[in-house]
Amino acid sequence: MAVKSVIQASKHPWMAALLRMCSDKAFIRLKWAGRRMPYKLNLKNPRTFNEKLQWIKLYDHNPLYTTLVDKYRVKQYVTERVGAEHVIPLLGAWDRVEDIEWEKLPNQFVIKCSHDCGGMVICKDKSQLDIPAASAMLKKRFDYNYYYEGREWPYKNVQPKVFAEAYKEDEFGELRDYKFFCFDGEVKALFIASDRQNKNEEVKFDFFDADFNHLPFTQGHPNAKSSKPRGFEKMKQLAAKLSKGLPEVRVDFYDVNGHVYFGEFTLFHFGGMVPFNPTEWDYKFGEWIKLPTTKRK
């Protein structure tokens, strides 16, 4: 039987408890098998991108990683390294969802949890926002530790906080992600996520090399026809600077009318559990990761 996510398993308390008792290594092996990856996981001699991400989860416990995945604290980290002009402005931060000062927020804003991945409230018109429903969703995410979803250990000790930031929209009427795959300060590839807010379309992913040549593979979603953003070279420059010293990290940006904003750091792209099609690209990306010579647990 395929391994369910912890959120899904929480509907069955006994299964959730059993999964939580698993060691990180056992959980990763179970989930890998449940995802029906096209090859057996090799943690002793990892070669592919996805395998090496699992190795990093288990054996590269750099304390900096917790700061990188903390969506609130990372704003200061990025400000100190590349400047506040590349950080989406903060509108407020609270220690509990119940403390959110909705009345003080502008008409448009985005609210996130510092320790979460994916869950957020996007408000384009506050007069139309169902605040009780938004609060309930945020409370659910606030009380959940994302670490248990895929054993991405940096999330385990992030201090929970809920915060609001300015709403941004690009020329396409959405906020496309430009996600750069970086390896110790060197940008090797990127992908663009589009149609994320279009309920009538499947999300599209387009992969490119560092010179914006389209790469012939898919991963999880079909291709679209994405164009090079105006801030492409600036994004590459910032990604290289922000990723220096890290064996691998995905650095995400937004381009709003030519102005580049930092999005987030992603240490474990798709959790390292989504196949490349064709698989040869999993090996190619894996060649770019130089794992630490010593383990840090």
Image (spheres, helix red, strand yellow):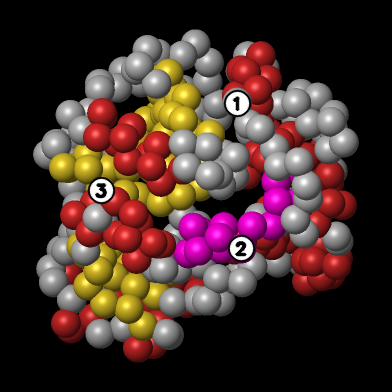
| On-image quarter of the C terminus | bottom right
- The image quadrant of residue 61 is bottom right
Q: Amino acid at mark 3?
A: Tyr
Residue at the image point whose x is 18% and y is 47% from the top: 169
Mark 2 — residue? 63
Q: Amino acid at mark 1?
A: Trp
Is residue 24 visible from the viewing direction of this image?
Answer: yes
Mark 2 lies on a secondary structure that is loop
Q: Nearer the viewer, residue 98 or 206?
A: 206
Q: Position of residue 216 (x, y in %)?
A: 49, 11
Cα–Cα span, label 2 and label 1: 23 Å
Cα–Cα span, label 2 and label 3: 25 Å
Q: Earlier in the sequence, mark 2 or mark 1?
A: 2
Mark 3 lies on a secondary structure that is strand
| On-image quarter of the N terminus | top right
Q: Residues within 10 Å of mark 2 (few under 14, many from 20)?
A: few
Q: Amino acid at mark 2?
A: Pro
In this rendering, would 286 be left or right of 120?
right
Foreground tag (3 vs 1):
1
Mark 1 — residue? 288
Q: Position of residue 179 (x, y in %)?
A: 40, 36
Q: Nearer the viewer, residue 105 or 48?
A: 48
In this rendering, would 229 be left or right of 133?
left
Indicate which disc residue 261 carries: 3
Q: Residues within 10 Å of mark 3 (few under 14, many from 20)?
A: many
Is residue 131 a member of the stretch shown in magenta?
no
Indicate which disc residue 218 carries: none
Range of residues picked out in magenta? 55-70
